[in-house]
């Protein structure tokens, strides 16, 4: 299991030391939640802050856009060269075009599904994807409780990927901890995003507990 700590749960008053500590603790990548106050009722990181995170981090960045006007935000963050940029299928009228645009920028494209969005909604996009992020909470805020129906959703998505012969990764974000990591692994999940669980505990021990 790959672990992507969510920097949304970090102490922003000492962000540089938090980035260094989380990288040294064994994170595989850093998850960056970008919220615009429109698609979700919260505002988080802009490119100026993420630029400094990228400068300090020894791990690749996983930028998760929770925004309206996806193309604008893709072009805003692409110069920082994250490994992944993901956007919500619920907010994009032309997903094929945007996925190709992200790939043309030298970044791995990914799509996000809200808890109520079925995995079949991205079946026609699987050839264009490097990762699918399943939200296991409603997007907008950290520290929410895990929605268990994502386990069945991950299993259905894994079946679609296997049928298609796709190597796209399945990522889950929201309420992840040592209490549900085994179930997530058994459901076919490849990557977990963990915020509160990692940052409220010993970073190294929490990350290691998720690497099942």
Image (tube, helix red, strand yellow):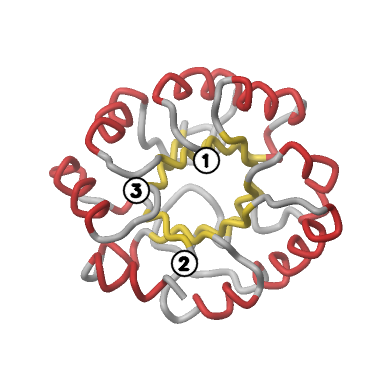
For the point 57% across and 38% down, the residue is 86
Count every numbered label the image shows and give the total: 3
Q: Nearer the viewer, residue 101 or 38?
A: 101
Q: Given this view, does label 2 or label 1 mark the residue nearer the observer? A: 2
Image coords of residue 46 (percent x, y)? 36, 27
Badge 3: few (under 14), some or many (20 or more) residues near its Cα, within 10 Å?
Answer: many
Residue occupying image coordinates x 84% and y 53%: 164
Where disc 1 sits, the SS reads loop
Residue under numbered circle 2:
175
Q: Is residue 17 left or right of residue 72?
A: left
Q: In the shown orientation, is residue 80 left or right of residue 99?
A: left
Residue drawn where x is 22% and y is 55% of the image: 24
What is the x, y in percent for residue 103? 63, 27
State which tag comes first along the sequence, 1 or 3.
3
- Please name whichever residue, 90 or 206, is drawn nearer the observer in this view of the structure: 206
Picture layout, residue 126 above or below residue 156? above
For residue 61, above or below residue 204 = above
Q: Does residue 89 appear left or right of residue 124 in this picture? A: left
Q: Which sits in the foreground, 183 or 166?
A: 166
Q: To which residue does mark 1 refer?
A: 40
Q: Earlier in the sequence, mark 2 or mark 1?
A: 1
The numbered mark at residue 158 is none
Alpha carbons under labels 1 and 3: distance apart:
14 Å
Task: Decide which of tag 2 and tag 3 comes sooner along the chain.
Answer: 3
Q: CA distance from mark 2 to mark 3?
A: 13 Å
């Amino acid at each position: 299991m790959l672990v992507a700590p969510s920097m949304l749960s970090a102490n922003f008053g000492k962000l540089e030391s938090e980035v260094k500590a989380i990288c040294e603790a064994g994170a595989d990548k850093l998850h960056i939640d970008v919220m615009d106050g429109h698609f979700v009722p919260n505002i988080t990181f802009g490119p100026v802050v993420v630029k400094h995170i990228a400068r300090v981090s020894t791990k690749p960045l996983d930028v998760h856009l929770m925004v309206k006007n996806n193309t604008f935000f893709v072009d805003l963050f692409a110069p920082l060269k994250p490994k992944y940029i993901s956007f919500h299928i619920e907010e994009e009228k032309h997903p094929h075009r945007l996925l190709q645009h992200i790939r043309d920028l030298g970044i791995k494209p990914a799509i996000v599904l809200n808890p109520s969005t079925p995995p079949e909604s991205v079946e026609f996009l699987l050839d264009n994807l490097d990762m699918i992020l399943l939200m296991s909470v409603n997007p907008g805020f950290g520290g929410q409780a895990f929605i268990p129906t994502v386990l069945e959703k991950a299993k259905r998505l894994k079946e679609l990927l296997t049928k298609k012969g796709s190597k796209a990764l399945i990522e889950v974000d929201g309420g992840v901890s040592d209490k549900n990591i085994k179930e997530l692994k058994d459901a076919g999940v490849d990557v977990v995003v963990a915020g509160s669980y990692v940052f409220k505990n010993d970073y190294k021990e929490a990350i290691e507990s998720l690497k099942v």
